[in-house]
């Protein structure tokens, strides 16, 4: 088992925290499926970041491929809100609603209308 580290998380600058004690028993579970992997990466102006959300990547965990996002971190961004939006958007995709694809289709349709 997880032993003494169960329900703990390290947050640099704060130390090792007991999530169960901080947020209550509803904030923890013994096992759960991983639906999405998010890497927070340093913002770099020179780096080409995905702007439309069409670049689907996967992360392999024990041979299971899980959707993988790389989100650039910059000063002043509320990362909790960005991650919540990413999680909600992932749920929409699982239900068959892909905002980026819808946008691209609408844009293409409008561009074709303009050519005629």
Image (tube, rainbow, N blue to C red):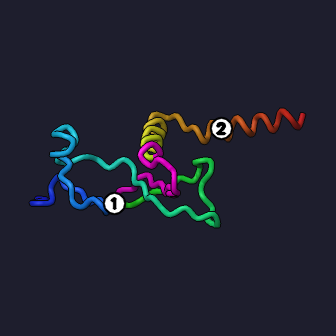
Q: Which of the 4 image quadrants contains residue 17?
A: bottom left
Placement of the N terminus among the 4 image quadrants: bottom left
Image position, residue 79 (x, y; %): 45, 49
Tell me where the magenta segment starts and ends, as one range. Answer: 64-82
Write the residue at 15% across / 45% down: 21
Q: Which of the 4 image quadrants contains residue 8?
A: bottom left
Counting labels gives: 2
Front position in the image: 77 or 105:
77
**From the viewer's perspective, is residue 102 above or below residue 52?**
above
**Side (left or right) of 11 relative to 111:** left
**From the viewer's perspective, is residue 102 above or below residue 61?**
above
SS class of the residue under badge 1? strand
In the image, residue 71 lies in the stretch drawn in magenta: yes
Q: Nearer the viewer, mark 1 or mark 2?
A: 2
Image position, residue 46 (x, y; %): 64, 67
Image position, residue 53 (x, y; %): 57, 48
Q: Name the residue under label 1.
A: 61
**From the viewer's perspective, is residue 35 above or below residue 15?**
above
SS class of the residue under badge 2? helix
In the image as oriented, which residue stretches furthest toward the bottom?
Answer: 46
- The disc placed on residue 97 is none
Label 2: how many Cα within 10 Å (few below 14, some 14–19, many 20+): few
Q: Name the residue under label 2.
A: 103
* First along the sequence among labels 1 and 2: 1
């Amino acid at each position: 088992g997880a032993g003494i580290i169960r329900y703990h998380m390290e947050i640099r600058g704060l130390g090792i925290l007991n999530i169960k004690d901080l947020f209550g028993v509803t904030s923890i579970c013994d096992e759960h499926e991983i639906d999405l992997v998010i890497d927070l990466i340093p913002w770099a102006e020179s780096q080409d970041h995905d702007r439309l959300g069409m670049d689907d990547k996967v992360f392999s965990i024990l041979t299971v491929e899980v959707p993988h996002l790389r989100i650039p971190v910059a000063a002043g961004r509320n990362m909790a809100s960005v991650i919540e939006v990413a999680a909600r958007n992932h749920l929409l995709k699982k239900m068959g609603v892909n905002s980026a694809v819808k946008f691209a289709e609408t844009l293409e349709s409008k561009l074709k209308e303009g050519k005629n």
